[in-house]
Image (cartoon, coloured by chain):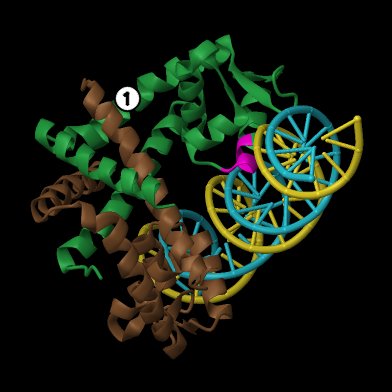
Chain colours: A green, B brown, C yellow, D cyan
Amino acid sequence: MTQLDSAQNSLWKIFLMAHTRLVNRVEQDFKQAGLPPFEWYDVLIALKQAPDQQMRLSELAQELLVNRTNVTRLADRLENAGLIQRKVCKDDRRGAFAVLTKAGLEMQQKMWTVYSQSIAQYFSRHLTQKDTVVFTKALTSMLTALDEQS
Amino acid sequence: MTQLDSAQNSLWKIFLMAHTRLVNRVEQDFKQAGLPPFEWYDVLIALKQAPDQQMRLSELAQELLVNRTNVTRLADRLENAGLIQRKVCKDDRRGAFAVLTKAGLEMQQKMWTVYSQSIAQYFSRHLTQKDTVVFTKALTSMLTALDEQS
DNA sequence: ACTAATTAATTACAATTGCAATTATTACAA
DNA sequence: TTGTAATAATTGCAATTGTAATTAATTAGT
């Protein structure tokens, strides 16, 4: 039975706080630039990188760690904004693809100019190259363990 | 103008993903143990550590990085559950204190037995002592910079 | 081939959040 | 002191989220 020492406990607290503050700040930057919320970027970049710039909604749900219900509705919003389009899946008529539109790609690019600046300024700037490596290893190890477990 | 390299970019992505996965897992552990959501713990521990185990709602809002509206309603829920009590503030009649109740303290303790296990298992276990120090420094530096800025 | 179980996506409803008033009190300045 | 601005908390309303049903199509077992 593992025990927590005080440095570990306080790191967890700082980790949560840093996440909240960073995300709030990034959201604020998007808002100030008149851009859509944070979450939309994840959809756009996932589609951009997918084959044919399209993904099944259920794939998208997994990728984004969002449940299906909410992907349905997130997709509704992006579709309303003209950034993606739904396409029925011929192999499986139950399913739907989300396809990136031209406007969607442009939005991804516009958002990235803001987003990359924010990440660099608030996050990466505070990490040495070595920090980055160490940090990546540790977080990856956590993710792997979570995967294996359940 | 700062630029992002690919290691930094992918670390940011992993950071976000790790946060989501960890928080989901902890929530799940609380739920399985029949305990209230994550967020309640933050309220309980904040009050426990405050002088007289009480805080103004606005202080609580700052501490939790939640806006006042939502603190009002979070406090409603905890008060309904008997874990805190509101008390009018004599110095400033506009204001209210949230006071930790006996049941609230007991709940904090019960939650901590579950929570500390989860943190240790999913998070701290993957960090060496040195990692913990480095990690803490980096995140603290981000938080400080965010504070100074705006 | 046919029924039952599974899966993809959506919808309904309740709970939570964010934003914009609102209320009550305090602080300040003419 | 009196009127104006600022502050603490709350409330109303719209948008978002989570959970549980619902619908439609596919897969598996007999």
Q: Label 1 lies in what chain?
A: A
- Which x, y percent locates residue A60? 54, 31
**Residue B112 colored in magenta in the image:** no
Evaluate whether residue B90 shows in this view: no
- The residue positioned 28% from the left and 77% from the top of the image is B49
Q: Quadrant of the C terminus of chain B?
A: top left
Name the dominant secondary structure of the magenta segment. helix
Horizontally, residue B92 falls left or right of residue A92, namely: left
Label 1 residue SS = helix
**Residue A68 colored in magenta in the image:** yes
Evaluate whether residue A85 shows in this view: yes
Horizontally, residue A135 falls left or right of residue D6, namely: left
Locate residue B50: give its quadrant: bottom left
Task: Give the residue number, with chain letter if any, for mark 1.
Answer: A116
Locate residue D11: give its quadrant: bottom right
Q: Amino acid at mark 1?
A: Ser
- Which x, y percent locates residue A78? 61, 26
Label 1 packing within 10 angstroms: few (<14), some (14-19), many (20+): some
Horizontally, residue B135 falls left or right of residue C13, namely: left
Q: Quadrant of the N terminus of chain B?
A: top left
Question: Residues in magenta?
Answer: A67-71
- Which x, y percent locates residue A5? 17, 68
- Which x, y percent locates residue A4? 21, 68
Q: Farthest residue toward the bottom?
A: B102
- The residue positioned 46% from the left and 75% from the top of the image is B95
Locate residue A104: give its quadrant: top right
